[in-house]
Image: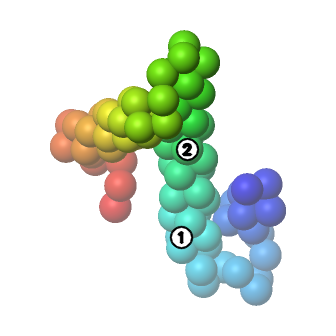
Amino acid sequence: VGALVVLSVGNFAVVEGISGSLLGALFAVVGLLVTAFVFLGAYFGVRGRGLGNAHGVAAGSFAAGLVFLVLIAVQLLVGVIG
C-alpha cells in the first residue's frame, strides 16, 4: 500500500501516465482491507461467544454487506468513485 501511495502521488516520469490507475488500485486495496477487517471482526466476535462457523460467516457477510451498502450510499450522495 505504501509503495502504491508513493508511486501515485510522487513525481516519477515512468508512472506519470498511470497515476490515476495506481490511485484507483490503492483505493480498491484499502477498501478490500477494511471490508476484510470488518468481516473477520464480526466472524471472530460471533465465534468468541460460542456460536458455530455458520453463524460467524452469516454475521461477517452481513457486516461486509453493510460496508458495501454504506459505500453505495456515499457514492450516491457525494460521488467518491469516478
For the residue labelled by badge 1, is the local secondary structure a helix, a strand or a loop? helix
Q: Name the amino acid, label 2.
A: Ala
Q: Residue, x 54% and y 17% (percent of image)?
A: 50
Q: Earlier in the sequence, mark 1 or mark 2?
A: 1
Q: Name the amino acid, label 1.
A: Gly
Closest to the observer, 55 or 41: 55
Image quarter of the C terminus: bottom left
In the image, is residue 50 above or below residue 12? Answer: above
Instruction: Inspect this view and state whether residue 41 appears.
Output: no
Q: Residue 56: which numbered mark, if any?
A: none
For the residue labelled by badge 2, is the local secondary structure a helix, a strand or a loop? helix
Closest to the observer, 11 or 60: 60
Quadrant assignment, res 41? top right
Closest to the observer, 34 or 62: 62
Q: Is residue 82 left or right of residue 26?
A: left
Q: Is residue 71 left or right of residue 42?
A: left
Looking at this rendering, what residue extends furthest in the left direction?
76
Foreground mark, 1 or 2, reads 2
Instruction: Inspect this view and state whether residue 15 appears.
Output: yes
Quadrant assignment, res 7? bottom right
The residue tagged 2 is: 36
| Circle 1 residues within 10 Å: few <14, some 14–19, many ≥20 | few
Q: Is residue 58 left or right of residue 45?
A: left
Q: Picture coordinates of residue 54 (x, y %)?
A: 41, 37
The residue tagged 1 is: 20
Q: Residue, x 35% and y 55% (percent of image)?
A: 81
Q: Residue, x 70% and y 81% (percent of image)?
A: 15
